[in-house]
Image: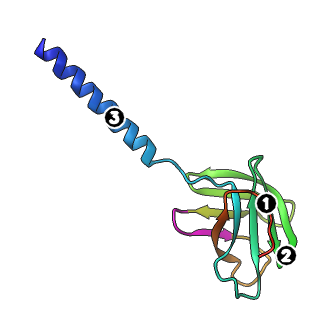
């Protein structure tokens, strides 16, 4: 009897630990509106990712690039488009990075998520 209670309690503890570990590994939702953190820069870059895996990059309030995106790893996405080589978008808990060829010399932009709503707004 004591052995059954001990096994049941141990099983419950294992289930609770698994649930906690699974919740800890939840990735940040990618859908939303992003813009460069340095709003005083020469290039205002904004990114919209929607739930249908479509994206649009705005450069100085004009559409610069659009296409589809796919997840390549836990927090990395590939932006596929008809222009040149694919771009990539890296998501972390605090900072997000957009690499897109052709905007300027560095082409790597630190982005912040402005909204979970995937819509373009002039900032």
Mark 1 lies on residue: 119
Q: Position of residue 65 (x, y in %)?
A: 84, 66
Q: Are marks 1 and 2 in contact (CB under 8 Å)?
A: no
Examine the image and state in which quarter residue 57 appears: bottom right
Q: Position of residue 10 (x, y in %)?
A: 22, 27
Reading the chain from its start, which is encountered first: label 3 or label 2?
Answer: 3
Mark 3 lies on residue: 16
- For the image shown, how many numbered marks are present on the structure? 3
As measured in the structure, the alpha-carbon distance from the residue carrying label 3 to the one carrying label 2 is 48 Å
Reading the chain from its start, which is encountered first: label 3 or label 1?
Answer: 3
As measured in the structure, the alpha-carbon distance from the residue carrying label 3 to the one carrying label 1 is 38 Å
Task: Tell me: 12 left or right of 101.
Answer: left
For the N terminus, which image quadrant? top left
Circle 1 sits in a helix, a strand or a loop, which is it?
loop
Q: Is 44 covered by the magenta stretch?
A: no
Circle 2 sits in a helix, a strand or a loop, which is it?
loop
Task: Tell me: 23 left or right of 4.
Answer: right
Q: Which portion, as a residue range, is magenta?
A: 92-98
Mark 2 lies on residue: 61
Q: Is 97 covered by the magenta stretch?
A: yes
Q: Are marks 3 and 2 in contact (CB under 8 Å)?
A: no
Reading the chain from its start, which is encountered first: label 1 or label 2?
Answer: 2
Q: Are marks 3 and 1 in contact (CB under 8 Å)?
A: no
Q: Position of residue 30 (x, y in %)?
A: 64, 55
Few, some or many residues within 10 Å of mark 1 (<14, 14–19, 20+): some
| Placement of 63 over or under 12, stated as above or below | below
């Amino acid at each position: 009897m004591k052995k059954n209670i001990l096994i049941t309690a141990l099983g419950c503890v294992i289930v609770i630990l698994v649930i906690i570990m699974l919740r800890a590994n939840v990735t940040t939702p990618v859908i939303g509106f992003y813009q460069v953190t340095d709003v005083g820069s020469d290039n205002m870059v904004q990114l919209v990712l929607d739930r249908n895996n479509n994206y649009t990059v705005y450069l100085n309030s004009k559409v610069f690039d659009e296409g589809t995106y796919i997840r390549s790893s836990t927090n990395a996405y590939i932006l596929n488009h008809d222009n040149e080589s694919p771009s990539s978008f890296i998501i972390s808990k605090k900072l997000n990075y957009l690499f897109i060829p052709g905007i300027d010399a560095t082409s790597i932009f630190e982005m912040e998520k402005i909204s979970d709503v995937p819509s373009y707004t002039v900032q």
